[in-house]
Image (cartoon, rainbow, N blue to C red):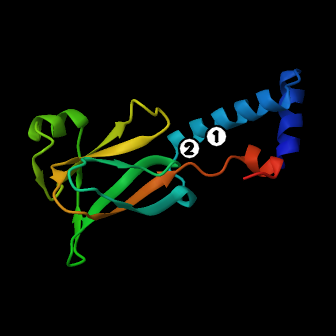
Amino acid sequence: MTYAQLKTAVQDTTENTFSDTDFATLTRLAEQLIYNAASIPVSRKSATLSTVIGNPLVNLPTDFLSAFSLAAISALGEYIFLLNKDVNFIREAFPNPATTGTPQYYALNGAPATPLTQTVLLGPTPSAPLSLDLNYFAYPESITVAASGTS
């Protein structure tokens, strides 16, 4: 079924017409509900992130939905898998962000200044630059984008 056929079917079923903008919004919201409820293999991705000495926050990819593993890669190339914890756990276990070391834990943390950016809070704060290997679920491209021919 094409996007145009979907729009026609929905309008016929609801006996209502929708503007292109309203139908695109409706479609994207439905897609998000589906992707939040189901883990589809095609939505699995990986990314390499970098830490900065003294900064416990690392930005996540913009298409990030949820993580299924995060590992710090040591200078020897060893993978140190971090344990997923709550932000409160990390703040209590490492109350002073100036306490540095090799991260053992991470927590998903929204960035208040930029609501669309998600970050990972590391505990303890990295004492050296590290590469992080993130395996995650991502939101696939919306059919509304594919239908309009834009990326």
Residue 105 shown left or right of residue 145 in the figure = left
For the image, the number of numbered tags is: 2
Name the residue: 81% across, 52% down. 149
**Image quarter for residue 70?**
bottom left
- In percent of width and height, residue 34 lies at 59, 40
Q: Is residue 89 above or below residue 126?
A: above
Residue 17 shown left or right of residue 77 in the figure = right
Name the residue: 84% across, 32% down. 20
Residue identified by numbered label 1:
31
**Image quarter for residue 69?**
bottom left
- In percent of width and height, residue 11 lies at 87, 28
Does dot 1 land on a helix, a strand or a loop? helix
Residue 51 shown left or right of residue 97 in the figure = right
- In percent of width and height, residue 84 lies at 25, 48
Is the residue marked by circle 2 packed among few (<14), some (14-19), or many (20+) residues within 10 Å? Answer: some
In the displayed orientation, state which residue is furthest to the bottom. 76
Tell me the number on the disc at residue 65.
none
Residue 109 shown left or right of residue 90 in the figure = right
Comparing 129 with 9, the one in front is 129
Does dot 2 land on a helix, a strand or a loop? helix
- Three-letter amino acid code at the position of disc 2: Tyr
Name the residue: 43% across, 55% down. 136
Is the residue marked by circle 1 packed among few (<14), some (14-19), or many (20+) residues within 10 Å? Answer: some
Name the residue: 25% across, 77% down. 77
- Three-letter amino acid code at the position of disc 1: Glu
Q: Is residue 91 above or below residue 66?
A: above
Is label 2 in contact with label 1 (beta carbons under 8 Å)? Answer: yes
Comparing 132 with 142, the one in front is 132
Residue identified by numbered label 2:
35
- In percent of width and height, residue 14 lies at 83, 23
**Image quarter for residue 91?**
top left
